[in-house]
Amino acid sequence: MRVELHRPLLAARIPAEGQETAVVANPEECAALARRFGLPAIHALTCRFRLRPAPGGAITADGHLRAELVQVCVVSAEEFPATVEEAFAVRFVPAGTECDDPDPEAVDEIPFADGRLDLGEAAAEQLALALDPYPRKPGADGDAPGRPVASSPFASLAARRRPS
C-alpha cells in the first residue's frame, strides 16, 4: 500500500512529559494527496500534534490541521480556493487493542504496529474528515445576498405565474 504522506515515529521515543511535532507536506506529497481525495490541488498542508503516552501503550494526540486547497463547487462545478482548518483529538493504540464501542462521541482510535505511529497518514485522514463533502463556492446560485433560495423546485414557477 502506497502512503502519500509518510512520517513514522517510534512510540517509545515519546517522552513521559509528551512532545510536540509537526507534519508539513512537500509539493509532491500535496499533489499525491490531491489525487487521493479527488481535489484539483492542495497547495499546503500542515498538521501539528501534541503527543502524550497513555496507559496500555496508547498515545493520545491533540492536533491542529490547516490546509490551503482547491475544491470544486457542487452547484456551479467551478474550482475555488478554500482553507480547511480543524482542531482534533485522536488516540494511537497498538493494533488489536482498538475499542469496539460505536460511540460517535468517542475519540477516534488509530491502530499502529511495530511500535511506529504514522503521523503523516494520521494527518491525511484528518484532512479527509475535515473536507466539506458538498463544497459550495461563495456566491454560488442560492448563496447570493438578498436572494431567497427556492423552497421547492416549483417555487420559481409559482413566482412567475400571472394573476388572472
Image (spheres, grey):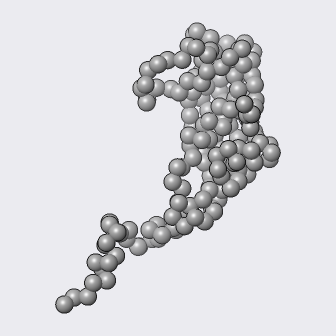
Spot the residue most to the left: 164
Which of the two residues, 89 or 26, is positioned nearer the viewer here? 26
Residue 9's place in the image compared with 154, above or below, is above
Q: Is residue 99 left or right of residue 57?
A: left
Q: Is residue 78 left or right of residue 13?
A: left
Residue drawn at (56%, 43%), measured in percent from left and top?
130
Residue 9's place in the image compared with 157, above or below, is above
Residue drawn at (72%, 14%), measured in percent from left and top?
114
Residue drawn at (65%, 31%), measured in percent from left and top?
122
Q: Which quarter of the figure is the C terminus placed in?
A: bottom left
Is any atom of residue 45 visible in this view?
Answer: no
Spot the residue most to the front: 1
Q: How many marks?
A: 0
The quadrant where residue 127 appears: top right
The picture places residue 160, in percent across and down from the top left corner, at 31, 83
Residue 12's place in the image compared with 48, above or below, is above
Which of the two residues, 66 or 95, is positioned nearer the viewer here? 95
Q: Which quarter of the figure is the N terminus placed in?
A: top right
Is any atom of residue 121 visible in this view?
Answer: yes
Residue drawn at (62%, 52%), measured in percent from left and top?
83
The picture places residue 103, in percent across and down from the top left corner, at 42, 26
The quadrant where residue 51 appears: top right
Spot the residue most to the bottom: 164
The picture places residue 131, in percent across and down from the top left corner, at 57, 46
The quadrant where residue 112 appears: top right
Residue 11's place in the image compared with 77, above or below, is above
The picture places residue 71, in percent across and down from the top left corner, at 62, 56
